[in-house]
């Protein structure tokens, strides 16, 4: 199975596809806790990304897009 990289937004241990959805969850004072991450996702799998917690993706969450793409490319070559 091949993987893709998806940019998502993490707040604590929850992932969001949309930054605004993540920002709505917390009070204004803690918005800086919402951060962009890059997640390796299996192609062709229909994730319910409105409910998925970050521990579901294990080691496939990266802070940098370049690092995520490198790991996904290496996985796809094997």
Image (cartoon, grey):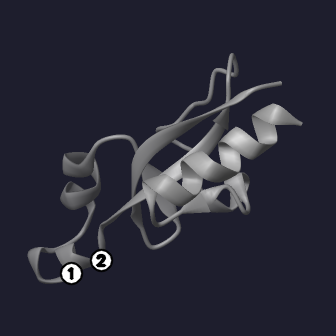
The quadrant in which residue 42 appears is top right
Closer to viewer: mark 2 or mark 1: 2
Residue reaching furthest to the left: 28
Residue that appears at 29% across and 56% down: 22
Name the residue nearer the viewer: 26 or 44.
44
Q: Secondary structure at mark 2?
A: helix
Quarter that holds the C terminus: top right
The answer to whether marks 2 and 1 mark residues whose Cβ atoms lie closer than 8 Å is yes
Disc 2/disc 1 C-alpha distance (Å): 6 Å
Disc assigned to residue 33: 2
What residue do we see at 20% from left, 59% from top?
A: 23
Q: Is residue 6 left or right of residue 21?
A: right
Outermost residue toward the right in this view:
78
- Whether residue 7 is situated above or below residue 49 in the rendered picture: below
Q: Helix, strand, or loop for circle 1?
A: helix
Q: In the rendered view, would you say 29 is above or below 68?
A: below
Looking at the image, which residue is at 20% across and 81% down? 30
Circle 1 Cα neighbour tier, 10 Å, few/some/many (<14 / 14–19 / ≥20):
few
Label 2 Cα crowd, 10 Å radius (few <14 / some 14-19 / many 20+): some
Q: Which residue is mark 1?
A: 30
- Residue furthest to the top in view is 44
In the figure, is residue 62 to the left or right of 71? left
Percent of width and height locating residue 63: 47, 66
From the top left corner, tell me how far across and down residue 26 is, in percent: 24, 69
- Residue 36 occupies which quadrant of the picture? bottom left
Quadrant including the N terminus: top right
């Amino acid at each position: 199975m091949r993987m893709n990289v998806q940019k998502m937004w993490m707040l604590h241990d929850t992932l969001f596809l949309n930054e605004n959805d993540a920002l709505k969850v917390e009070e204004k004072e803690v918005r800086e806790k919402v951060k962009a991450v890059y997640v390796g996702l299996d192609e062709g799998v229909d994730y319910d990304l409105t409910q998925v917690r970050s521990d579901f993706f294990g080691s496939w969450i990266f802070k940098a897009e370049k690092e995520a793409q490198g790991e996904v490319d290496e996985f796809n070559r094997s």
